[in-house]
Image (tube, rainbow, N blue to C red):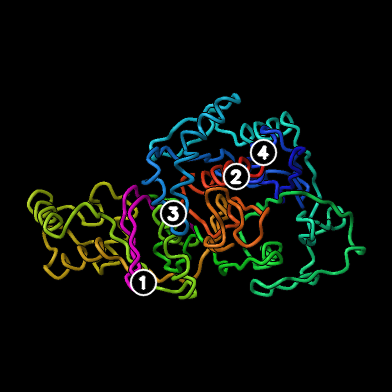
């Protein structure tokens, strides 16, 4: 029996990793990318630095960082972990470094290092790389091979050409109206997150069902003028919560021109992706600016200020580690006049300030996608995929990798690691004779 003929649809991180892995095992592999450039998301991720993975080397702990898909990924992480990712890139001349928060980047601080590494590895392994090759339709023939019909070079997939049928066989326009037809023994779909249901149409046409796509990893719009006046200010450790849907996270927070962002907000949005979508992204957000201090400790600090600094203005005496401008706005928002001194602060004012520090209420009125991540919750149902091989349980010979699956992680390199791991496992399985 000759080498397996494999086609990978999607020229992103997962697709490339799978293609390289399979080709290095002797398979004949082609990557079809519908746009004019490979690895675009890798190129722009992490502010152009590419957060390759996260320095977590216990697979069980690593799997807890996925709001959806963590349980399914546990066994795959035992086979290809973050440490394996480090070794893979290091063996190809790209060393990674670990930052204080655990995120791992190339030592060059340039995503181009990762792009070049993947491109060079693919070429060295003999992968056929094709751009402007959008797949219009796919079907499995009686001989067990897949038949793909390509669109015109450079043209986007036309929504009118397909219809979603919730797991049933899809339909496509006659093949002769499109471009060439190509065939393969095994097919990998690695087309990225299903921002719209049409993005998962190839999987649906082969019998799969999709979990509805909704955004994950997004920032919050907040219209409070006093908050927006603080744009650019960051606080290293806050606690944010949405009690109505039982969400709570701790971590850094960044105030922006449109509201709030930062790791604490992104993690909250990931874990609450579906719940916050159901709220139409309109809900009260509560912020504890000093989560390490309980009410008793705050009261003692206030009493000390009265005794030792009674003549000072309250607005001018920030509690560490809060930035002075943020403290000033929190004091004013709690109803304390700008000229109030510590010595004359009333009991009710003290209580109001303590409440403001521990439970500032902010009205969220919308969201913006985090441009460094582009993560979507939803995709091919995990129960329909064998995670030992990444092969479909519905359609033998069909494989999946990356964000097309209903898998998404919190920010910090976890989504790329899911792509490397599922791509590697799929590549190994597809190359097997």
Compute the Cα span from label 4 to label 1.
43 Å
**Secondary structure state at the residue bearing disc 4:** helix
Which circle, 1 or 2, is nearer the viewer?
A: 2
Mark 2 Cα within 10 Å, few/some/many (few <14, many 20+)? many
Camera-nearest residue between 248 and 302: 248
Q: Name the N-terminal-most of marks 3 and 4.
A: 4
Q: Which residue is mark 2?
A: 423
Q: Which residue is mark 1?
A: 245
**Secondary structure state at the residue bearing disc 3:** helix
The x and y percentages for residue 79 are: 48, 40
Compute the Cα span from label 3 to label 1.
21 Å
Q: Farthest right residue?
A: 176
Label the magenta part by its dominant secondary structure: strand
Magenta stretch, residue numbers: 235-257
The x and y percentages for residue 126 are: 76, 32
- On screen, 15 above or below 364? above
Q: Which mark is residue 70?
A: 3
Compute the Cα span from label 1 to label 2.
34 Å
Quick check: 229 left or right of 170?
left
Which circle, 2 or 4, is nearer the viewer?
A: 4
């Amino acid at each position: 029996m000759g080498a397996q003929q494999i086609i990978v649809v999607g020229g992103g991180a997962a697709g490339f990793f799978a293609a390289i892995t399979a080709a290095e095992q002797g398979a004949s592999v082609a990557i079809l990318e519908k746009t004019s450039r490979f690895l675009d998301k890798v190129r722009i991720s992490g502010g152009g630095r590419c957060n390759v993975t996260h320095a977590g080397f216990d697979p069980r702990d690593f799997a807890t960082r996925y709001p959806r898909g963590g349980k399914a990924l546990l066994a795959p992480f035992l086979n290809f972990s973050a440490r394996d990712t480090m070794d893979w890139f290091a063996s190809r001349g790209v060393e990674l470094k670990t930052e204080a928060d655990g995120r791992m980047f190339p030592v060059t601080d340039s995503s181009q290092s990762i792009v070049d590494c993947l491109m060079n590895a693919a070429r060295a392994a003999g992968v056929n790389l094709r751009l402007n090759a959008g797949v219009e339709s796919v079907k499995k023939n009686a001989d067990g091979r897949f038949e793909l019909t390509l669109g015109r070079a450079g043209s986007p997939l036309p929504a009118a050409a397909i219809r979603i049928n919730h797991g049933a066989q899809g339909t496509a326009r006659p093949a002769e109206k499109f471009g060439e037809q190509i065939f393969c023994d095994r097919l990998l779909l690695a087309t990225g997150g299903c921002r719209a249901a049409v993005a998962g149409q190839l999987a649906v046409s082969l019998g799969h069902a999709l979990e509805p796509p909704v955004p994950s990893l997004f920032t919050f719009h907040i219209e409070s003028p006093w908050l927006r006046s603080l744009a650019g200010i960051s606080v290293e450790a806050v606690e944010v919560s949405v009690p109505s849907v039982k969400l709570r996270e701790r971590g850094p927070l960044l105030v922006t021109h449109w509201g709030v962002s930062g790791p604490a907000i992104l993690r909250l949005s990931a874990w609450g992706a579906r719940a916050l979508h159901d709220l139409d992204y309109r809900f009260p957000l509560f912020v504890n600016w000093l989560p390490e201090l309980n009410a008793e400790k705050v009261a003692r600090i206030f009493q000390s200020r009265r005794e030792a600094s009674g003549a000072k203005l309250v607005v001018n005496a920030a509690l560490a580690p809060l930035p002075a401008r943020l403290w000033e706005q929190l004091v004013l928002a709690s109803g304390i006049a700008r000229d109030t001194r510590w010595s004359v602060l009333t009991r009710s004012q003290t209580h109001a300030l303590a409440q403001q520090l521990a439970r500032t209420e902010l009205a969220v009125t919308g969201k913006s996608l985090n441009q460094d991540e582009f993560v979507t919750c939803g995709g091919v149902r995990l129960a329909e995929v064998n995670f030992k091989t990444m092969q479909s349980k519905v359609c033998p010979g069909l494989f999946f990798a990356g964000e097309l699956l209903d898998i998404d992680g919190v920010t910090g390199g976890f989504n790329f690691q899911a792509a490397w791991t599922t791509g590697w496992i799929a590549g190994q399985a597809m190359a097997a004779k």
